[in-house]
Image (tube, helix red, strand yellow):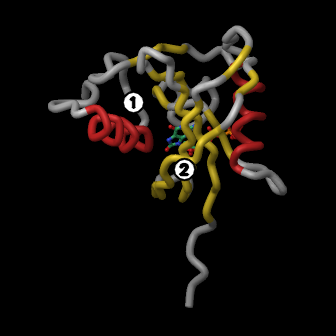
Amino acid sequence: MSAGRPITEVAVGVLVRPDGQFLLTTRPEGKVYAGYWEFPGGKVEAGETVEQALARELREELGIEIGAALPWKVEMFDYPHALVRLNFCKVFDWSGDFQMLEGQQMAWADLPVQVRPVLPGTVPVLNWFAEERGHAGPTHLD
Ligand SMILES: Nc1nc2c([nH]c(=O)n2[C@H]2C[C@H](O)[C@@H](COP(=O)(O)OP(=O)(O)OP(=O)(O)O)O2)c(=O)[nH]1
């Protein structure tokens, strides 16, 4: 039996403001899908929990310190470059000023999301938001 493709664990932060808007950032130059909009986060390193990885990634990428990371949904996504397990966590508390430490762009978004293109592995989150919020119609632009 084949062992199959290795799974890359990814910690993803869904930062939600009191007004319901959520944070999207672009993938930096030099990474696969550069310029695509996604929820900030990155790969879990050996020995880390998802919550630890998320705190580290958001510190490295955005310069913020997060409070609780609340596990929300887990989704597998099979890209040509990797088989990833996306561990989405909601985050309502953070401190510090946002700094785009990897030259990304950021946007506070609501449904339907106006920035484009959105990373394929990000679209399920928009559908979960649509269900939670009773949003009908498209969740993002094509
Ligand atoms: N951060 C993030 N990654 C996502 C989302 N949706 C999605 O499919 N992914 C995928 C894209 C990548 O294959 C993987 C994240 O890996 P990455 O390359 O951003 O991770 P990293 O910052 O640790 O990068 P690296 O420098 O170690 O390569 O997860 C999402 O909403 N946010």
**Residue sitting nearer the eye, 35 or 134:** 134
Quick check: 27 left or right of 19? right
Q: Position of residue 106 (x, y in %)?
A: 53, 14
**Residue sitting nearer the eye, 61 or 16:** 16
Split into quadrants, the picture shows ligand 1 in the one at top right
Q: Quadrant of residue 136?
A: top left
Q: Which mark is residue 108?
A: none
Q: Which mark is residue 86?
A: 2
Quick check: 63 left or right of 18? right
The residue at 55%/27% (across/down) is 15
Quick check: 113 left or right of 54? left
For label 1, the crowd category at 10 Å Cα-Cα, with few meaning under 14, some 14 to 19 and many 20 or more, is many
Q: Quadrant of the N terminus?
A: bottom right
**Residue to which mark 1 is pinned:** 118
Q: Position of residue 98 (x, y in %)?
A: 67, 11
Q: Position of residue 36 (x, y in %)?
A: 46, 28
The residue at 48%/51% (across/down) is 73
What kind of element bears circle 1? loop
